[in-house]
Amino acid sequence: MANNILEMHSITKTFPGVKALSDVNFKVEEGEIHCLIGENGAGKSTLMKVLSGVYPYGEYEGDIVYQGKVQQFNKISDSVEVGIAIIYQELALFPDLSVYENIYIGNEVKKGSVINWNQTIVKAKAMLNKVNLKVNPEVLIKDLGVGKQQLVEIAKALSKDVKLLILDEPTAALNEDDSENLLELIKQLKKQGISCIMISHKLKEVVAIADKATVLRDGQTICTLDANKGEINERTIIKHMVGREINDIYPKRPEKKIGDTVLELVNWSAYDSQLGRDVVKEASLTLRKGEIIGLAGLMGSGRTELALSIFGNPKNYKLRGDLALNGQPRKFKHTSEAIKAGIAYVTEDRKGNGLFLLQNITNNVSAAKLSGISNNGIINDNEEIKVAEYYKESLHIKASSIEQHVGKLSGGNQQKVSLGKWLFVGPNILILDEPTRGIDVGAKFEIYSVMNKLIEQGLSIIMISSELGEVLGMSDRVYVMAEGRIKGELAAAEADQEKIMELATQ
Amino acid sequence: MKIINEAIDLVKENIRDYGMYIALFIIMFTFNLMTNGMFMSSRNISNLLDSAGYIAVLAVGMTLVIVIRHIDLSVGYVAGFLGAIAAMLLMQQGLPVYIVIPIILVLGLVVGLFNGFLIAQLGIPAFVASLAGMLIFRGALLQVTEGTGTIIVQNASFNALGNGFIPSLAQISERHLLTLIVGLIGIIFYFYGEFKTRHDKKKYNFEVVSNSIFVLKLVFVSAIIGYITWILAGYNGFSWTVVIVLLVTMVYHFISNRTVLGRQIYAVGSNPEAAHLSGINVKKITYLVMASMSMLATLSGILYTARLQSATTTAGMLFELDAIAAAYVGGVSSAGGVGKVTGAIIGAIVMASLTNGMNLLGVGISYQYMIRGGVLAGAVIFDVITRKKGK
Ligand SMILES: Nc1ncnc2c1ncn2[C@@H]1O[C@H](COP(=O)(O)OP(=O)(O)OP(=O)(O)O)[C@@H](O)[C@H]1O
Ligand SMILES: [Mg+2]
């Protein structure tokens, strides 16, 4: 019988007002890749935080048996010491420090109490080799793409002699190429005897990589599936995750009533004076009423910059070219003017610049349209509560109440709050930047359904997405961007993965 | 028993909000015991509140400044300098009070807009910008008082702002009548507000606290308002300082809790970038908050000058630190987006009570500083711990 490196017995963890985990059992065999899956708010991140000592011994009930011994971690460094490393949903690197400093931070290469920097760099190079990352260890983290940053995180974990590596949605922010790289790396590590727990909402990856998969739902273990028994396929996983069968990932499109052009860009360029270059170059695009256009491309291809330059230009780019709304040339001096003109932008980085994490759901939902809950500048609290309750219901936001601080919601539910905030604005043009990043299949389906409903009501949507499946499944037309330029436009009927990737990597 | 449980739950859930009130209660109660009732005597309470006034108005403004993640170190000398200007206009130019005060307040506004320009427009860190302001106004204060030395203010209506009391109309059984009436009106307004809120909540079918808790709260709060009014009525009644502080508190409380502007201020403090993307004009908010701060600093300067009946060369020294301390004791957070105006007032009263009580007990000045420092640290520790546990 194979050895279990980890057994978690009857883990229960409660927060004020929510039981995040109840009686969860979870076992990982030595040297396997074990995926942890479940809907948003199912408790996956919480279980991993219990395991790694973020929630110390005593704050949860149940036992953690690791390498045959019952462990009582009082702090994160206790779990690190026995070889458990966790890479969080949100990256925890220092952007202004170099790669090598990041790898060895908290674990410095020292002689006495003096750091040996040369030695550090040498060792860091070795670690970078292990993760197949060819960068100079002296470059700053902020100058690397997200994919490479992710690899640095893993190098950092490896530097601590890790035996059990935990990855919380590692590929959520990665494009397909980077994701594949990462999965390849995880398989390599497995050959070296490192066990791995991976949380992911991308079921394709789970199918490709998992030896086992444990499904959580509402804080409970539903089952553990085994690849050797042929149990790991998308249908089975989805069935266990949501408790019912979902046949189509993308809901049926309503009958299309595409109308006149609502937004038109002609030779639109945006110059970023901090970077000293054009981040958007001579882009031309049209968006019609009742239409979803997909904006595909690699990370850093200028899609977010394009969206920001339309949405009131908060980054103060120098803009050239023409923007017309409903045929009228427009210039927005501030985001508030764009919002007034009926444009809404749901950011890709919901924690960084999308939400007010220390405020409750209520205040977040109303933040972009305070006029909708006030009279002559005076807030009507009750109206506001009603609005928040409405979006909590209609978007199925899982929270103990609308009073809950948004920072304490699970990732997917934060995304829904963000969406609710912008729907409340009542826009004509909705720009969604990576709308389903980190969202479970059930919720994705819900968000797609909401999008379709909005289209039916005559909205127009620009969807920026790195998930090709979603771009193909939802868009009427696809624009592909690379290096700030729109490289091509594809109609839904002619678009496929190869054509998009070809344009994106031109 | 159900009421008691519900009450305990309510306090536990809102321990951050109630913590300060409980602390203030304990401090006052303890001092009162130790001074054999002298602390809560009419005369002392009246004196205590007056001495807290000019810091309290600063603390209100400072709370909002800290909420939007800035700081204003210049407020002390702005208060000192503009207080001196007020004294000069009154005494040397012979202008009447009702002209001097608006002029001074507008000057304060201009100073604040300039701070806003440095911080919002040029992006200079508030700490540095206001440190520069502090030095400049310190110099300016010395400059204007250099020739004259201390400027004595001989203007009864101006000095009344710091020392005077509202007229009594009549005394009933040794109590100040108008004060009692004002207190009563206060209680009536409080009742009205609470009943209206509850009624509205019910109209929307939202959850409300049980009837008995509601009544308990009404009785409790009106008893406190009543008690304080009663005490003050036993001496000279409400002072003009207290009236001004109450007005400032009400206006700022209303703005920060009930208006779009207030929401925008807290949104900017919570996450400036998200606020910008939500269509909120972050620069405008910064201007407004800095301008309001300097205007309150001016008001503080007026109160202080009136209280001393003179403008001195050292007026305003260390006010900024007292105001910052009061704001932090009142629960503001330097991480931004958190902090209440009412908290700042309580914070100012807590700090003033400590000074006042320790003076009554004859505690040496060296120990006084240490104890006040300890209380400040304790308040912030309490805040940090309870925040971790919150919702
Ligand atoms: N610090 C906290 N305080 C209160 N509730 C919390 C806290 N952290 C998590 N929760 C709640 O616990 C539940 C589980 O959250 P968790 O983050 O583990 O979900 P998840 O499975 O990782 O979801 P996602 O896929 O969206 O990341 C959610 O209902 C969440 O709101
Ligand atoms: Mg999670």
Image (cartoon, coloured by chain):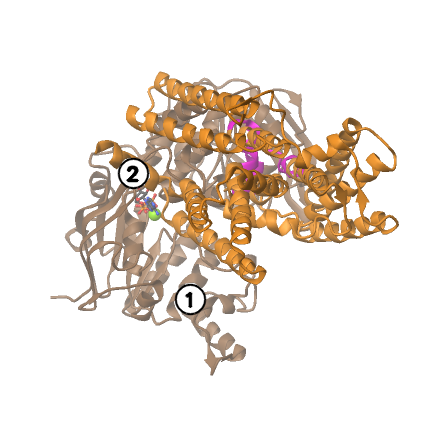
Chain colours: A brown, B orange
In the image as oriented, which residue stretches furthest toward the bottom? A112
Regarding residue A389, the answer to whether it shows in the image is yes
| Residue B9: numbered disc | 2
Q: Position of residue A54 (x, y in %)?
A: 33, 57
Q: Would residue A434 be found to the left or right of residue A209 on screen?
A: right
| Type of amino acid at the residue the image marks with label 1 | Lys
Q: Say what secondary structure mark 1 lies in.
A: helix
On screen, A226 above or below B100? below
Towards the viewer: A306 or B267: B267
Regarding residue A476, the answer to whether it shows in the image is no
Q: Residue at x 68, y 30 (%)?
A: A322
Q: Position of residue B87 (x, y in %)?
A: 80, 39
User: Magenta part mainly helix, strand or loop?
Assistant: helix
Q: Residue at x 50, y 48 (%)?
A: B329
| Type of amino acid at the residue the image marks with label 2 | Asp
On screen, A44 above or below B53? below
Q: Position of residue A447 (x, y in %)?
A: 37, 32
Q: Say what secondary structure mark 2 lies in.
A: helix
Q: Which residues are magenta?
A: B258-287
Towards the viewer: A313 or B325: B325
Q: Which residue is mark 1?
A: A156
Q: Position of residue A316 (x, y in %)?
A: 66, 40
| Residue A231: numbered disc | none
**B274 in magenta:** yes
- Circle 2 residues within 10 Å: few <14, some 14–19, many ≥20: few
